[in-house]
Image: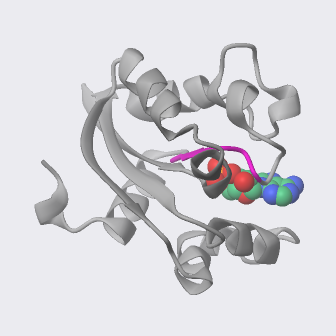
Amino acid sequence: MAQRTFSIVKPDAVRNGHTGAILAEIEKAGFKIVSIKKQSISQDQAKGFYAVHKERPFFEGLTKFMSSGPIVLMVLEKDNAIADLRKLMGATNPANAEEGTIRKKFATDIEQNAIHGSDAEETAAFEIGYWFAGYELV
Ligand code: CMP
């Protein structure tokens, strides 16, 4: 059944000119783009988005990085979207990512890892609602 997930092209990949290549990989893999926008976010917005990680040692650095330049936020749809996007992205740490994955191709390190994808249905619902209003979903 068609499922929605949420994804971000992170500031490293946008800065390095990889937005188009990453979107091409996503569409080639069969995802429909339900909504997409490019914007710069504040560190406070990033902190709200990553609130589940607030006790982690990397929280400050991660939220600073995510607000360091424009990002591309997307809602994607396909059968099994959540698991399929995570497979296409590869491991969080690009050093462990499989050949052919987006992170293997475009990520710099475990923090600056090119792309975000929701990890479960509940987080996808929270993340879509955090960044998109209902009228933006087409
Ligand atoms: P993401 O899928 O966006 O979800 C949480 C993010 O935290 C993750 O991608 C990485 O960018 C970042 N992250 C996870 N683990 C670490 C770590 N050990 N050090 C720095 N950043 C991390």
- Residue 112 in percent (x, y) is at 75, 51
Q: Residue 121 or 30: which is nearer the viewer?
A: 30
Q: Quadrant of residue 54?
A: bottom right
Answer with left or right where residue 2 lies relative to residue 130.
left
Left or right of residue 133, residue 12 in this image = right
Relative to the observer, which residue lies in front, 57 or 74? 74
Q: Quadrant of the N terminus?
A: top left
Q: Is residue 116 magenta?
A: yes
Quadrant of the displayed image that contains ligand 1: bottom right
Find residue 47 and report its horizontal and vertical position in percent: 61, 79
Q: Nearer the viewer, residue 41 or 57?
A: 41
Residue 80 point in image, percent of width and height = 38, 26
Asked if residue 66 is positioned above or below residue 93 in the image, the reply reads: below
- Quarter-of-image position of residue 52: bottom right
User: Measured along the vertical axis of the image, is residue 127 above or below residue 81?
Assistant: below
Task: Indicate left or right for 88 with 68 as reference.
Answer: left
* Residue drawn at point x = 12 percent, y = 47 percent: 138
Where are the magenta residues, as a range?
112-118
**Which residue is found at the position 42% from the left and 61% from the top?**
127
Say which residue appears at 45% left-offset and 53% top-offset.
72
Question: Does 95 appear above or below 101?
Answer: below
- Percent position (x, y) of residue 23? 43, 32
Measured along the vertical axis of the image, is residue 129 above or below residue 116? below
Q: Residue at x 33, y 26 (%)?
A: 31
Colour pattern: one colour
